[in-house]
Structures are given as C-alpha cells and as structure tokens.
Image: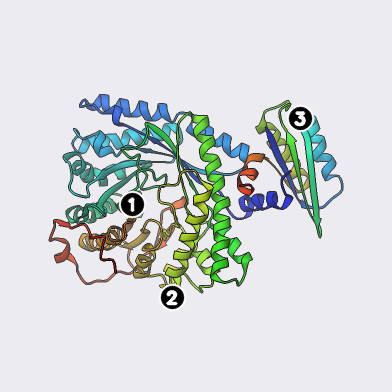
Amino acid sequence: MLNINDVLETVRMIREENLDIRTVTMGISLFDCISDDPERLMQKIYDKVTGSAKDLVKVCEDLERTYGIPIVNKRISVTPVSYVGSSMMRDGYVRIAQTLDKACRELGVNFIGGYSAHVQKGAIRGASELIESIPEALSVTERVCSSINVATTKAGINMDAVRRMGEIIKDTAYATRDRDSIGCAKLVVFSNIPEDNPFMAGAVHGIGEPDTVINVGVSGPGVVAAAIREAGQCDFSELAETIKKIAFKITRVGQLIATEAAARLGVPYGIVDLSLAPTPAAGDSVAEILENMGLECTGTHGTTAALALLNDAVKKGGVMASGHVGGLSGAFIPVSEDRGMISAASKGILTLEKLEAMTAVCSVGLDMFAVPGDTSAATISGIIADEISIGVVNNKTTAVRVIPVYGKTVGDTCEFGGLLGYAPIMKLHSESCESFIKRGGRIPAPIHSLKN
Amino acid sequence: MKAIVTVTGKDKVGIIAETSAECSKRNANIVDISQTVMREFFAMIMLVDLEGLNCDFKTFADEMQSLGKDKGVDIRVMHEDIFNSMHRI
C-alpha cells in the first residue's frame, strides 16, 4: 500500500498547485503527402493529419479521467511545411495553412505547429515563399503556428533571414491588428531549433523523426514554488536538492502519460520535455519560484543566478525520471503568460536587457513580450540578432517571439486571452541599428575552442 | 486495474461507511484502507480493485465525486500508477 502522505501530496499538487500535463503533442510526418498537384496535396495533408490524430483528443480525455491529472493541450506538430509544399507559391502555402487549420478544428486540437522553414544557411525557394506567406497565413487561420530557424551553432546566423523576419513580424502584427497583433504570438524565430519540441509556437516534426510520434510537455511551476516555500531558509545545496526531487516527481507523471498515450494510440513514444511552463493563472508562475528563492521582484539583481539554479536542477531531477528527454527542456519565461513576469515588467523592474540575460541560462528565449507598434523592422531584427547570437555562441536553443502591438505604445497593455495572457508594452532603445542589420549576408559560425 | 480513492475534507460521522457502500454498490473491492485525522481535517485513502466493476471507470469516478460533493468532502478516484510513478523509483 502506498504511503498516505505520498498520495495526499500528489492530490495536493493537482488540486492546489496546478500540476498538469501541459501538452500531449502528436508529431506527424507529411513527407508522404508531397504532390505537385495542389488539390491532391491539400487532400493528402488533410487526410493524413485527421487520420493519424483521429483518436488523440479522446485518448487524452480518457487518460485525464483515469489518472486524475489534467492534460491542458492536445496538439499536433508536422514536418516543416516548407519541405512539403516546396513546389507551391505563396498562395499555395496559405492554402496549406488553411488545410492544417481546418484539420485541427475537425479534431478539436488547439494548435498545430510546423508552418516552418529552416534557413540557417540560406533559403530554398519553397522556404522563401513560405516566409513571405506568413502574415497572411497567420491572419486567416486560428490554430496554425509558425517557426523559422535562422541560425545554428554549426552554420552561423543567416542575417538576410533575420532582416526579413523583422519585416515579416511587423507585417504579421499589422495583418492581425484588430486582435492586438496576435498573429505574432504564433510566430517564433529560432536558433538551433529542436526537432521534437511539443510546445508552441515552435513545435515541428523534424525530418529524422518516425512517421508519427507522441511527445509530452510537463509543467508545474506552482508545485516547485510550493516546495521552495516549504523548504524555508535553506542553503543553495538544499534548495537545488528540493527542486531536483520535485522535478523528478513532476516528470514521472509526464513519462507515465507519454508511454500510456503512445501505447493507446499505437504510435512510438518520443520524448518528455522537462519544462516548467507557466500560465497567467495565480500560482502557476516561474517568476514566483524565483521570488520564493528570496528575490523581492523578478528582474532584480540575482535573478539570472536564481534562474540558472532552477533550470539546472529541473533538468537534473527530470532526466532520471524519463527514458527519453528532449524538446526545449527547462524553465520557460514568457512574459505575457506568467503573472509574476507580467507584474515585474509592468513595474519596470524586468527590462528587456535583463530578460535577454536570463535567456542565456534557461530554456528558449525572449518569449511573448510586447513592444510598441511603431518599432521599426530593423530594431526587431536587432532584437532577434542579439538573442540568436546567445544561442549560437552558447550552443543552445534560443528564440524570439515578439509582438509589436499595432497602435499601442509604452504604458499600454495588450490582451491575447487564454493561456497567451496579457502584457505591458515594454520600452526599447530608440537608437537605430538599421545600418548594421542591412549589411546582409551571414555571421560566420563561432569557434568552439579557445573558450573564455 | 487498481485505483486509489482519496477522501479529504472536514471530519464527520459516516464518511468511511458511505464511501465503502458506494464501492460495494459498484462491486469495487476494497483491498486496503489508510486514514488519518489532523485536527478536524480528515484524509483517507483506499486501494480498490476495479476488475469486477459493474460500470465503466468514468461512471464510478463521477459517482464517487458527486458523493463527495453531497457530503462536503473531496473524493477522487485515480489509477494507482500515477502514485507509483511519482513516489517509487
């Protein structure tokens, strides 16, 4: 018989501390849908997605009931669409986006990722067409997410793509101006993009993946925050140990759901993403964890160290709990999706510069932050270039999901609703980086010896 | 399959009896029971074998949950593997 206190701890985590499975994401290869006949291509994509994932939502709902743990999102990732539609022009890509959106609606899946291209060294024709189609594709669809990989540690940074993505983000903001530029919340620019990430907006089904696969993202910032609160004024070794233990428990639930979902759906289990993903709900905040460690407000001095400790301990605890770990794996710090981050940014204590420093030691990057709508495309490209450089030089994934909210400026707030949350408009430098960005070409891959 | 029934809330007369009666009605075999009372807070866990259940799992779990609502306590039925996964290496 299980220990009563262990059982009650699990129930408390779910009931009071917002422990949940953040996403069960089915990866689906679309390579076998490729056709030069647009009608046939659309039909094959629709049939493949709706056929492969027909039981996804039902199986997840059964698992929720059986194990008593909420599965917040049921999602799909597909092969980067730039490869699948490489014979299409821009309007053909938009049709693919609409086809994916329709399949998602049919299935009851809330997001589909993979409207994506890899252009770290240069763009194939289809990738260029896809990039040009993004503003329209994200404005005429609800559930399609797009990601563009503009750099890798081995290839360096494609600055032509960085420059163009600054413009595309501006155009996407304008195309969705009636909804606080929400299109940009579904668009992310990456360095070193992972091929098995279950989280949006950056989920893609990589080209080395099986035909279909189940990847799971766990969550539980509230559980970690509570454990740290209970641990009290301990030293850092004990603090790290506390986080490791709780991360182990959280991840074990993810592992259980991943293997069960895969078995019931008859597809291979891929990875568990060891993530701490916040939501705007009370008690579900990564910033709260940092503040429970002893910071008066996230963004103040000590924040980067606290986040580094958290991120490392989460990985150490989680790795032992799961057979296969992948995706982004670490603490997420999206501004608009985390009540503590929103509060810190609203007070002006969490600045963009501090946020950038934080991304050097944790998962992903500059995520879900809003900037004035009149920010120039070059400035957005400059923000992207800075963040991507951190990833390329440090051999890690980084990304930028920035929303230049049309018609809004510093002092305003934008509202995306649901898990995407709300955010204050953050202040940027007014000095231009346009001459730097317009140089074009590639920043060479960094050297990985002579480390200092 | 085996499940864990957890009952938590303010202590009152008859909680164990009524939860057990519900299990019996649905032919859920109680394998083990453990309980504790801290101040006025009551917590009980029951390991139940659901092999002979005379309804589906969802119905059983929903009925237990509504019994809890009627009695002012929280009753949950969860597959034992979520606890085994989390607390055993």
Q: CA distance from mark 3 to mark 2?
A: 58 Å
For marks 1 and 2, the one nearer the N-term is 1
Residue at horizontal 38 percent and vertical 43 percent from the top: A196
Task: Report the amino acid beneath label 2.
Answer: His
Task: Report the amino acid beneath label 1.
Answer: Asp
Mark 2 neighbour class, 10 Å CA radius: few under 14, some 14 to 19, many 20 or more: few
Residue A431 position in % (x across, y down): 21, 72
Q: Is residue A410 above or below residue A52?
A: below
Residue identifier under label 2: A301
Q: Is residue A350 above or below residue A62?
A: below
Q: CA distance from mark 1 to mark 2?
A: 38 Å
Residue sitting nearer the eye, A211 or A338: A211
The answer as to whether the residues below labels 1 and 2 share one chain is: yes
- Front disc: 1 or 2: 2
Secondary structure category for the residue under label 3 = loop
Secondary structure category for the residue under label 1 = helix
Q: CA distance from mark 1 to mark 3?
A: 54 Å
The answer to whether A391 appears left or right of A212 in the picture is: left
- Front disc: 1 or 3: 3
Residue sitting nearer the eye, A225 or A236: A236
Image quadrant containing the N terminus of chain B: top right
Task: Report the amino acid beneath label 3.
Answer: Arg
Residue identifier under label 3: B26
Q: Give me the disc on residue A178.
A: 1
Residue A282 shows in the view: no
Residue at mark 3: chain:
B
Labels in figure, total? 3
Residue at mark 1: chain:
A
- Front disc: 3 or 2: 2
Residue A255 shows in the view: yes
State the image quarter where residue A375 is shown. bottom left
Residue at horizontal 35 percent and vertical 28 percent from the top: A46
